[in-house]
Image (spheres, grey):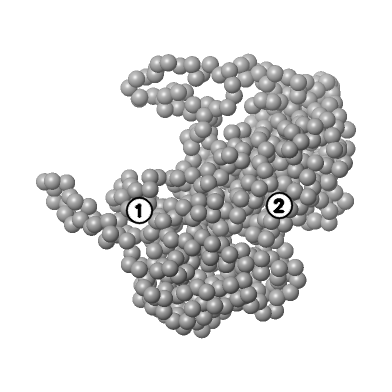
Amino acid sequence: MRFSATALAVAALAAAGAVDAVKVNPLPAPQQIQWGTSGAKKIALGPGSLQTPGAKGANKDVVYSAFSRVVKTVNKVRWVPAAIEAPIPKFESFPGTDAPAALERREDLRRGNPGKATGSPVTTATIKVADWSADLQLGVDESYSLSIGKDSNALEITAPTVWGALHALTTFQQLVILEDGQLVVEQPVHIVDKPNYPHRGVMLDSGRNFLSVQKLKEQLDAMALTKLNVLHWHLDDTQSWPLQLKTYPQMTKDAYSAREQYSRDDVKDLVSYARKRAIRLIPEIDMPGHSAAGWQQIDPTIVTCQNSWWSNDNWPLHTAVQPNPGQLDILNDKTYTHVEKVYKEVGEMFADNIFHVGGDELQTGCFNFSSSIREWFAADASRTYADLAQYWVDKALPIFKAENNTAGKKRELMMWEDIVLSADIPAKQVPTDVIIQSWNSPANIKTLTSKGYRTVVSNNEFLYLDCGNGGYVSNDPRYNDQTNPDPTGATFSFNYGGPGGSWCAPFKTWQRIYSFDFAANLTESEAALVIGTTAPLWGEQIDDTVIAGKLWPRAAALGELVWSGNKDPKTGLKRLTQLTQRISNFREYLVALGIAAAPIMPKFCIQHPHACDLYYNQTAVV
């Protein structure tokens, strides 16, 4: 990527150590950012300020739409930073110690006003794209450069594709602040940026509780700002089927209500909305497990154990890990006829090449309710549940890959790691062209990549956003515990320091997410097979009223983790302490946009940088 004269001028200024001249930096942190020192640049852009030399095709409209959206937002919000960046201050020493006694006052922590805007105001924006036709698919080039020169009146963006240009615009949006009544970028700036991983996602679950189109769009808006580029949409589960299909309109009899359904137009609208923000929608229809709602309306004989008691109180007889049970009958030929029709129609609604077909948490007890499966096992004593899982793989995957079922797409499949690594029902041989989503032990990342699988990391110890909120199953005697069995607190129990009903407790804080070294201990070839991460937000206790607070700003920490990493490129140390003010400011910015992101600390903390650090030593996290 060539540097313009403007960029070189900015770089020369930056050599003087100009980073300290600004109050805020964008999130995620760019790979390279160089600030000048000459003073603020006034921003005077309007919807008609954009120039796009050589622009052509439908993607031109995507860029113009994004630019107009950014200009409108910065002029509406007129953002005053709520959390500024500053080094840790000196505090009064403890009496009688030899520690330094210098005390910096609060006002000394605040960066100086960059001063009155100098030089030419920024009145034009030029976006140069090398390939205007590049499709938004896994692996598309998302890099960009952005420059605002000292003596230039232009915002200059260069990118190989429009998708990189869109990321540049969301970076620019975060650079614009209000100073002395005018919108400015604090200093001339030059950025060169690209993602570390091509798959950067969150997973939302509309099967357990319905999520409105409006709320899904709200999350897409926030995702775009953090450069998260995949919404993995877990559309259905045993509890409900909310998606309207022409092939089987009766499936939505298992929607929660007529109001809690998605039409084909809703899906089309969401796919388009996401694309305009450089986000891919990957649909998931979980099969053959987690399958009752909808399927039983087509033909109840293709579902097994849906009318059983899930049997948590008698675990050897359990048919599901949570209510309500149901799995597709793998040995029923009619199962595959209906699966093919559903899969084909759902795939037609989405633009992405990837389709997630589930494959997790198959329960042996549920399959015991199928007479055909019982007879199959009885006919050959050597057969195992691994053979049963392999039967599904051998029958279903050719359907999923068949050209007439993929709407002309270069279909790639994604499945949960259970289909390969389950202790109870793993398939014996799953093709390595299937992308595997790993959600259990971090050690599984190495196991999968060493087998040659491209892997998406969704480890529950770091990335499950629904964890730590207690249990949801009712009539639970475990809560009826009036006395701590160990008053000393030396050992934890269910209600006293323990999980409290959340199987994956504790709550995953933004610091926990950001600290995840998911590629540790991998060889170079194994690490190359990790294509990114997805943070799941399972929906048992999530609906429109709480979704934003559960996702944000924690998902922003993930955005930076997979975009530019969690380590300072200069020191090699984790930059957790540097992220604190940026993610705090980002949270306040989301709130200003009307997105109800949760607070992560008292406002005192974000107004007093580092005053709430656990350790004074700023290299405590390595």
In percent of width and height, residue 288 lies at: 76, 34
Q: Residue at x 76, y 55 (%)?
A: 351
Return the disc, 1 or 2, that comes first in the chain's sequence.
2
Mark 1 Cα-neighbour bin, 10 Å: few <14, some 14–19, many ≥20: some
In percent of width and height, residue 315 lies at: 63, 19
* 533 to the left or right of 579: right
Q: Residue at x 54, y 51 (%)?
A: 594
**Residue 613 appears in the figure:** no
* 489 to the left or right of 104: right
In percent of width and height, residue 445 lies at: 58, 45
Which residue is nearer to you in this view: 184 or 187? 184
Mark 1: secondary structure? helix
Mark 2 Cα-neighbour bin, 10 Å: few <14, some 14–19, many ≥20: some
Is 449 rendered above or below residue 141?
Answer: above
Which residue in the protein does label 2 denote?
270
Q: Residue at x 13, y 46 (%)?
A: 95
Q: Residue at x 66, y 41 (%)?
A: 211
Is 591 rendered above or below residue 465?
Answer: below
In percent of width and height, residue 153 lies at: 52, 80
Mark 2: secondary structure? helix
Which residue in the protein does label 1 denote?
607
Determine the residue located farthest toward the left in the rendered image.
Answer: 96
